Image: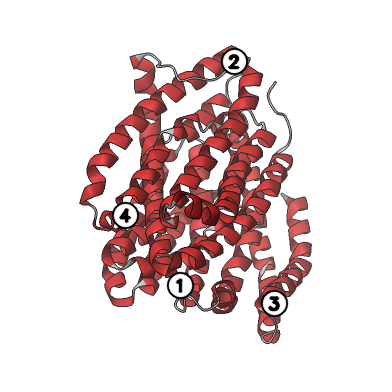
Amino acid sequence: MRGNKGVLHNLSILTAGQIASQLLNVWALIYLTHYLGAHWFGVVQIGVTFMAYALITAEWGMFSLGIREVSRLDKPTSILSYVRTHMGIMALQAIIVFSAGLVLLPHLPFYREDPWVFLLYLMAVLPQVFMLFWVAVGLERMAWVSLTRTALSLLYALLVLLLLSPLEKITGLVGHRLVPVLYLTAVLGSNLCIGIPLARWFGRVLVPALPSVAEVRRRGHETLPMGANIIVQRVLLNIDLLLLGILSTPSVVGGYAAAMRIIFLLMVVVEVLWNALLPRFSRLSKTDPEEFNRAFNMYLGFVLAGLLPVAVGGYLVGPDLMTELYKGQFPDSGGVFQVLAISYTMLAIGTFFGNTLVSEDNQRKYFPPLLISAVAAVIGNILLIPKLGGLGASLGMAGSHFILFATLFFLLRKRFSRQLAWVTMGLMPALLVMSLVVIALNSWLVYFRIIAAGAAYLLVASWPLLRFRKSV
């Protein structure tokens, strides 16, 4: 009944679909920058950011709790009852957030750019109730998870690339209003992709049902720190875009988002990884603490091997990459990308640390570092954006991401093994070789430089990684 494949198998399934969908999404992102122009692309990005805060407020840790608790249930009837009542709670939360959003939006300065953009994005909280990928994660049905997550990204990208221009001509609606409509359409399509196989697995269509008041209170008590962690973490992800929308102009937001959305793929990678790891880590934390710690060090070693070259390489090729992608449309995006390549690497590692605490029910330890870092992000952006614009926003985020990384590193310092320290040191020569290749091939097209440098890194890094895999 429940999926029983290994973590690496699950991760490979999730990764395969995400690679294809995210590459297509980059294409759609670049298309939108040219189609909408800097101003309206910036307005849409502010809308996406506002939607993200609405979605996580309406969800408030329910996905993480659902994954953890479904992974510990065995009887299909018990799982069905749990899922339906979970959906019921989420439906109540979605209605509350939607109503609050209708009241809040008119008071925000960017709302006047085009109210319909923000109202349409706010509507996304309603179909989120039926976004049931978390059930499949808890059941370890990773093919289903990959299908629904890939479907959302692919459908949205395809709709933008194929239908945005024709629909604008047919309907007479402006492009920046059609973008959120296409996103909502993609959400509904992806919900069907997961809803249909789950309905077959359970033998019935999943519809929300309200649990007892006592159960609502229990789950609310469990999700309180999770939801607080997630919404504060969202500040560390994109408060820069929201504050740029308030303190700057949409065109500045557009240029910043052009760089930020590319490097943001790092966070997608970490999310995919934890979709594969969380069910197993949750069980190991209860049944085999020693194996839990071994797995933590092993996966962290490979995470570092994947993220460190992104930070170094992103800094080295950032300006050339942004120029090539956007054909000089956003001249300031290169410096922003350089800072964010390092910044988001620190955030991705910090997120790995924090999710480890969540998997062992220690989410309350995760909150203070998140809160301190989030406050630093807000203060840093408010101080630096008026002086430096997008670059100031990236520097403000870099400072806050470093604080999160450093504090969580200190909290988890006793978990790190000697083998992890050795493999991290062993990656340094590979990073040096990669950097030398990037510099030596400076006259090459940036894409070929990236491929050549990546190949050189993998060649040199493979030996310490193989030794590390055998030693843990």
Q: Position of residue 276 (x, y in %)?
A: 63, 40
Q: In the picture provided, is 379 more to the left or to the right than 33?
A: left
Question: Which residue lies under the disc numbered 3?
Answer: 449
Q: 327 above or below 298? A: below
* Kind of residue at disc 3: Arg
**Residue 114: mark:** 4
Q: Residue at x 36, y 50 (%)?
A: 117
Q: Quadrant of residue 54?
A: top left
Residue 293 visible in the shown view = no
Task: Give whichever of discs 3 and 1 has the lower sequence position.
Answer: 1
Mark 4 falls on what kind of element?
loop
Task: Give whichever of discs 4 and 1 has the lower sequence position.
Answer: 4
Mark 3 falls on what kind of element?
helix
Query: What coloring was used for the rendering?
Result: secondary structure
* Kind of residue at disc 2: Arg
Q: Which is in the foreground here, disc 2 or disc 1?
A: 2
Mark 1 falls on what kind of element?
helix
Task: Give whichever of discs 3 and 4 has the lower sequence position.
Answer: 4
Label 2 and label 1: CA atoms lie apart by 49 Å
Task: Give whichever of discs 4 and 2 has the lower sequence position.
Answer: 4
Q: Which is in the foreground here, disc 4 or disc 1?
A: 4
Q: Position of residue 268 (x, y in %)?
A: 56, 51
Label 3 and label 2: CA atoms lie apart by 52 Å
Residue 435 visible in the shown view = yes
**Residue 204: mark:** 2
Q: Which is in the foreground here, disc 4 or disc 2?
A: 4
Q: Which is in the foreground here, disc 3 or disc 4?
A: 4
Label 4 and label 2: CA atoms lie apart by 41 Å
Q: Residue at x 69, y 67 (%)?
A: 426
